[in-house]
Amino acid sequence: MAKKGEVFGVFKKFRLLVQNESGEVISRLRTNGGGEYTSTEFNDICSSNGINHEVTAPYTPQHNGISKRKNRTLVNMIRSMQKQKQMPHYLWGEAAATAAYLINRSLTKKLQDKTPEEAWCGVKPSVQHLKIFGSLCFKHVLDQLRKTR
């Protein structure tokens, strides 16, 4: 999202994605008290879909403990990966996508020895394709798309 004002549209798409992919419905949503989450239209979509919208008190990050810890884990992974491979800061997004991908394929105690990917899809993910982050790689261009200079 480029702007906070896009939250409503993104949430509507996310809610449908969750329902279509998992067959489950969102029953609870915890957000901060930001204006993007407290608008009339946002509250209307929550109430019309049976979503219990919990708004945390201002300036109390401890109410978002799980998300804050997961965010810290993600940021620490990103920083470590970039520092280890001495990568430039502009590749932060690639490191973030890789870190999230790895977290979703790692066992968690909360899911009782399942990965988040397995809990979502019902299939144990393979990790055979994983390579060391920052490894030298080459893009394959199909013969039909190759051009001579």
Image: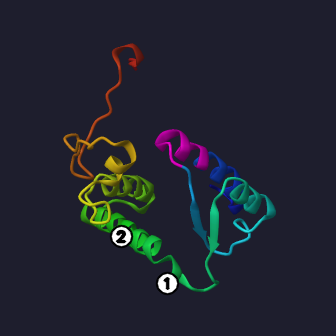
Magenta segment main secondary structure: helix
Determine whether, in the image, residue 76 is placed left or right of residue 90: left
Quadrant location, the N terminus: bottom right
Position in image of residue 9 (x %, y %): 69, 50
> Start and end of the magenta stretch?
15-24
Position in image of residue 132 (x %, y %): 21, 51
For image coordinates 62% across by 72% down, the residue present is 54
Residue identifier under label 1: 62
Residue identifier under label 2: 73
Q: Residues within 10 Å of mark 2 (few under 14, many from 20)?
A: some
Q: Amino acid at mark 2?
A: Thr
Q: Amino acid at mark 1?
A: Gln
Element class at badge 2: helix
Quarter assignment of residue 41: bottom right
Determine whether, in the image, residue 91 is placed left or right of residue 83: right
Position in image of residue 135 (x %, y %): 23, 48
Q: On screen, 9 above or below 123?
A: below
Q: On screen, 96 above or below 73?
A: above
Q: Residues within 10 Å of mark 1 (few under 14, many from 20)?
A: few
For image coordinates 76% across by 58% down, the residue present is 44
The reply to whether the C-beta atoms of the residues labelled 1 and 2 are less than 8 Å apart is no
Q: Earlier in the sequence, mark 1 or mark 2?
A: 1
Q: Total number of numbered labels?
A: 2
80 part of magenta stretch: no
Report the front residue among 63 and 2.
63
Most extreme residue toward the front is: 50
Q: Nearer the viewer, mark 1 or mark 2?
A: 1
Determine whether, in the image, residue 58 is placed left or right of residue 97: right
For image coordinates 32% across by 33% down, the residue present is 139
Most extreme residue toward the bottom is: 59
Position in image of residue 61 (x %, y %): 53, 82
Q: CA distance from mark 1 to mark 2?
A: 16 Å
